[in-house]
Image: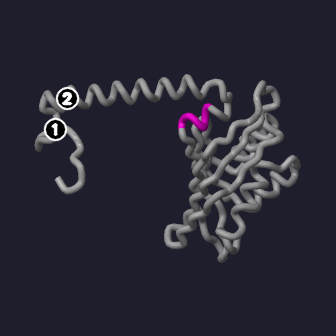
Amino acid sequence: MQNPKAEITAIVTTLTSTKSNSELVDTISKYFTPDAQFVHLICVAGSRAEILWIYQWYRIMSPETKCDVENIIYDRDLNVIVLDMVQWFSPRFRFSSPAPARLNTRLTLLENDRLHYIARQEDFYPTMDFFALLSPYLVPFVWVFLKLTSLVSNLLARFFLRAGALKGGGTGLKARGE
């Protein structure tokens, strides 16, 4: 990429939505380093070839995936792009319409001869959005699980605060100005 911020949306769209295997191969070959890393909630890869296989399987599972890049942050000093996206994953064998899932992707770039290549891709999903990708029917159960773990966390915090686990006093928030 000569201009990562301007070019990344088209690259991401091709990676997530193309129906052409040759276009997918060309895109990964052109924009990823040979030893690129890919870190996802359910898989990891350590080479361009492995990343290609993951994207190929992704396209086989969901040939109608859509992805909208809503915001791009490009830090030239760190050579990092952070993408805020919404994705609609549509598995072939699904009994409901695709649910939107928010996704943040961090791309670590490597500059070589004034061109930028993706050296590492890390995908971050909110928990409920990830389960919505699998099945919207799971979302209420995940929400209940998250609420229960939050309740347990809060109860344990109160117990240990009263037992003196943190020094310095104060067990709650105060309104501004107090």
Residue name at image x 72 percent, y 50 percent: 67
Q: Position of residue 116 (x, y in %)?
A: 65, 68
Q: Any magenta on residue 2? A: no
**In this view, 93 is above or below 84:** above
**In this view, 169 is above or below 7:** above
Q: Contact, CB < 8 Å: mark 1 with mark 2?
A: yes
**In this view, 158 is above or below 20:** above
Q: Quadrant of residue 50?
A: top right
Q: Position of residue 110 (x, y in %)?
A: 60, 65
The residue lying toward the viewer, choosing from 124 and 136, is: 136
Of the residues shown, which amino acid type is indicated by label 1?
Answer: Leu
Residue name at image x 23 percent, y 44 percent: 173
Q: Position of residue 100 (x, y in %)?
A: 67, 41
Of the residues shown, which amino acid type is indicated by label 2?
Answer: Phe
Q: Which residue is mark 2?
A: 160
Residue name at image x 69 percent, y 58 percent: 32
Give the mark, 1 or 2, whose residue is nearer the N terminus: 2
Q: Any magenta on residue 128? A: yes
Q: Secondary structure at mark 2?
A: helix
Residue 166's label in the rendered image is: 1
- Crowd rating for badge 1 (residues with CA inside 10 Å; few <14, some 14–19, many 20+): few
Task: Kindly report the distance in space between the C-alpha atoms of the residues bearing marks 1 and 2.
Answer: 8 Å
- Crowd rating for badge 2 (residues with CA inside 10 Å; few <14, some 14–19, many 20+): few
The stretch of residues the image draws in magenta is 127-131
